[in-house]
Image: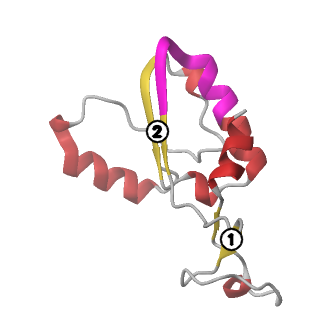
Amino acid sequence: EPVDKHLETAKKTLQQAWPGEFYCCTLQDFDPGRRGVYDLVWCQWVLMYITDSDVVAFLQRLARSLAPAGTVVVKENVAQERVGSYFDDEEGELWRGGGASQASQPMSVLRTPQHYVKLFR
């Protein structure tokens, strides 16, 4: 989690129930190789907020830190094949581009299953 206040809330809410560790950093900066060996890594609704190159770089760093039989689970929304991969705006609608304001910038990307397969290779 890259936002301190959200991480603190998670720590207070989970307290003793969470056996793992908490890290305050972006996914792009998280280096699991420094953190030890993982049997399971669950990525849910986070890859949609980073670029293809950041996804690949994260997965490459992650691969080096997995246990020999380690597993990575990716759970993301996917785009339909007939639509193809596309960007969403802040309201979850198709981002059409244009304008220089923050409100006109894409917020996430919906990739097709085939797009993910290419990233995972």
Tell which circle, 1 or 2, labels the residue nearer the N-terminal end. 2
Q: Amino acid at mark 1?
A: Arg
Q: Residue at x 61, y 30 (%)?
A: 31
Q: Is residue 69 magenta?
A: yes
| Crowding near the residue tagged with mark 1, few <14, some 14–19, many ≥20 C-alpha atoms within 10 Å | few
Q: Quadrant of residue 105?
A: bottom right
Residue 27 lies, in percent from the top left, at 59, 45
The range drawn in magenta is 59-72
Instruction: Give the image location of residue 46, x and y in percent.
Output: 53, 53
Q: Nearer the viewer, residue 89 or 32?
A: 89
Q: Position of residue 41 (x, y in %)?
A: 45, 32
Q: Name the residue at 38% across, 51% down.
A: 7
Quarter of the figure with the C terminus: top right
Crowdedness near tag 2: few (<14), some (14–19) or many (≥20) residues, C-alpha within 10 Å: few
**In the displayed structure, would residue 61 be above or below residue 113?**
above
How far apart, in angstroms, are the residues tagged by discs 1 and 2?
A: 38 Å
Query: What residue is shown at x 59% (from left), y 48% (from top)?
Result: 26
Q: Check if residue 98 falls in the magenta segment.
A: no
Q: Position of residue 53 (x, y in %)?
A: 78, 46
Most extreme residue toward the front is: 82
Viewed as shown, does residue 98 lie left or right of 112? right
**Image height of 3 relative to 58, above or below:** below
The vertical placement of 85 against 43, above or below, is below
Q: Compared to 81, does 2 lie above or below?
A: above
Amino acid type assigned to the residue bearing label 2 in the image:
Tyr
Residue depicted at 39% across the width and 38% down the height: 22
| Residue wearing tag 1 | 82
How many numbered marks have been drawn onto this rendered protein structure? 2
In the orientation shown, which residue stands out farthest toward the left?
A: 16
**For residue 23, which numbered disc appears in the image?**
2
